[in-house]
Amino acid sequence: MPESAPFAAFAQTLADIAEESGRHAKADRLGALLADLSNDDLRRAARWAAGRVFPLADQRTVNVGHAALLSAIATASGTEPDHLRARLVALGDPGDLAAEALADAVSVSEFSLADAEAFFADLAETRGSKAKTAKLTDLLTRLAPQEARFVVKLLTGETRIGLLQGGVESALARTFERDA
């Protein structure tokens, strides 16, 4: 089995896409990442770039609410929940909050796209908010800020990079010279 790509490279690509202004530039940026991935990682990255944790035909959900996300971020970062709530209002995005709160976290992790897929699957099978929060907290303590940003964004179902399903399809078509 080929080694899975680093989640950090995927997360950085999504951050770069968010900074791009045109849809073709966004598609090209994503395509550059997708072109170098294994088939398994390609499926993961394309789905996640569109903001979906699981394939459309898959009925699983992660069911992690904002309270659980906030609790996990607070515990992982050692930041007071009230401060995080105020920052969430200012930032407007739980993923951006995670990156800010964990700014002093590890700078490099070994987390891969396959690890992320396994984590999402495990979270979907986990019952109870406390158990889900504990697993998310544990993961956040091991991620670099940019990785934490996009794990949380995926858990909320919104990557907010300006690239929806159609943009991902365009990136795939342009990269692999196929019709969308």
Image (tube, helix red, strand yellow):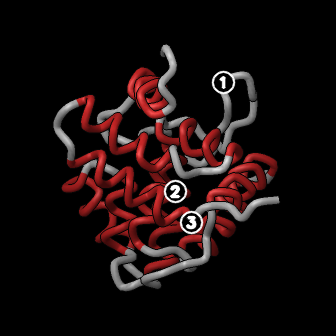
Q: CA distance from mark 2 to mark 1?
A: 19 Å
Residue 42 in the image, given as x and y percentages of width and height: 61, 43
Residue 130 in the image, given as x and y percentages of width and height: 69, 62
Q: Which residue is mark 3?
A: 6
Q: Which residue is mark 1?
A: 56
User: Taking 114 as reference, is 77 above or below it?
Assistant: below
Q: Residue at x 67, y 30 (%)?
A: 55
SS of the residue under disc 3: loop
Q: Earlier in the sequence, mark 2 or mark 1?
A: 1
Residue 157 in the image, given as x and y percentages of width and height: 49, 38
SS of the residue under disc 1: loop
Identify the image quadrant of residue 91. bottom left
Which quadrant is home to the N terminus?
bottom right
SS of the residue under disc 2: helix
User: Is residue 130 shown to the viewer in this render?
Assistant: no
3 vs 1, front mark: 3
What number is the disc on residue 151?
2
The kind of residue tagged 2 is Val
Q: CA distance from mark 3 to mark 1?
A: 24 Å
The kind of residue tagged 3 is Pro
Q: Earlier in the sequence, mark 2 or mark 3?
A: 3
Residue 29 in the image, given as x and y percentages of width and height: 34, 44
